[in-house]
Amino acid sequence: MNRQRALAVTAAGAIATALSLAAGAAPASAEILDAKAEEARAELTGNVSEALISELQDTFGLTEAEAYDRLAVEDVAADLLEEVPADLDESYAGLWVSEEADEIFVATTDAADTTGLRAEGATPVLVEHDLATLEDAAAAVAPISMDGYYGNYVDVVNNTLVIEAADTATAAGLIEAAGIDPSLVTVDTAAEAPQTYFVRGGDAYIVENSWRCSVGFSVRQGSTPGFVTAGHCGSAGDQVTSGEAAPGTFRNSVFPSADRAWVAVGSGEQLLDDVNMYSGTRDVANATQAAVGSSICRSGSTTGWRCGTVQAFNQTVNYAEGSVFGMTRTNVCAEPGDSGGSFISGNSAQGMTSGGSGNCSSGGTTFFQPIGPALSAWGLTLVTT
């Protein structure tokens, strides 16, 4: 694939204290990435739906060949996301796909890691703070309740903890209360107060004949069929009384702190292994986590099928109902009525729509509950192709 190579500090938008290690060694990293991507592309050819390729072309302005190139690099990034953190351990500071999806960056605090990272096809970036330090700071801030504090997340691209607040005074008070180093923090006062998307999403269902939400993904607990959705859609024991989904009962639900639930349906109900795209369906093959920068789409009954990219993991979101932790941040738009619906990257299930800010006219930010914690907490198995 053709690539426009640049220093990592420019291409990734890293903070001024970050030092690119790509200079002089990027061709070697790029050649290895190209080889891995070509292998991934060969596996994708013939196994990717025309709808997915068309969607990537429309969302990112790509040709068909460029859409395949993007998917191939994202597949390589997903593999590295499973391997690199354990390999680097304490020096690891994050991984992301470039905006053009032609480069994979890995941040580290140890220059000795660079040779190994280049050998994996990644472009190393030397930064000041390791990921564990930033996540510890995020954990110290997360449980504090304060008017005007909307949430926080670790921005691996810029090697900083972002605190979203109404003003700098609120953020300063939060930093002091948490007892964290201010140098770790960037304050975002342009953020809006988030809200949960409550009414409809994906395939709609009605709870207690009163309100609507949407199916996330089909799952089973042993032989019991059901689906995962957002926790704020219902409490344990609430009944799904009608809608496009089969009738059932909320077996488990967590909100706030997290935003996940699962609904058990009748033993004779059919579970589909796909997601409603509103112009067709998308098969679900697995639940492999997509890297920051990867393409991702969301299904919801209010705004239909919308796409964008993953921006950050482990977002803390302060809703009016309480704080939720461990959300994934995206720039996919959503509106009230899209709650609980599916977030999917390629054919990999990612999570269930929680809430956010903005709308699909002017753009916005949407958070989703990763599907992994729901599957592991309740012994659920994702229904796949």
Image: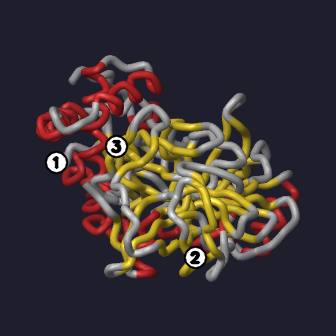
Percent of width and height locating residue 244:
54, 53
Q: Earlier in the sequence, mark 1 or mark 3?
A: 1
Residue 360 seen in this snapshot: yes
Cβ atoms at labels 2 and 3 below 8 Å apart: no
The amino acid type, in three-letter code, at marker 1 is Ala
Left or right: residue 283 versus residue 187 is left
Q: Is residue 140 visible?
A: no
Total marks shown come to: 3
- Mark 3 = which residue? 346
Mark 1: give few (<14), some (14-19) or many (20+) Cα within 10 Å: some
Task: Please give the name of the residue rendered at 34% of the width and 43% of the height, measured from the top-left corner.
Answer: 346
> Badges 2 and 1: C-beta atoms under 8 Å apart?
no
The residue positioned 68% from the left and 71% from the top of the image is: 142
**Quadrant of res 44:** top left
Residue 371 placement: quadrant: bottom left
Distance of label 2 from label 3 (alpha carbons): 29 Å
Image quarter in which the N terminus is found = top left
Q: Which mark is residue 119?
A: 1
Q: Is residue 164 above or below residue 253?
A: above
Who is closer to the viewer here, 85 or 209? 209
Q: Nearer the viewer, mark 1 or mark 3?
A: 3
Q: Is label 2 or label 1 in front? A: 2
Looking at the image, tell me whether mark 2 or mark 1 is earlier in sequence order: 1
Q: Amino acid at mark 3?
A: Gly
Q: Earlier in the sequence, mark 2 or mark 3?
A: 2
Task: Write down the residue under mark 2.
Answer: 250
Residue 88 position in % (x across, y down): 30, 65
Q: Residues within 10 Å of mark 2 (few under 14, many from 20)?
A: many
Q: Mark 1 and 3 residues: CB-CB less than 8 Å, in contact?
A: no
Residue 84 in the image: state x and y as whole percent: 28, 60
Q: Which mark is residue 169?
A: none
| Left or right: where 106 falls relative to 174 | left
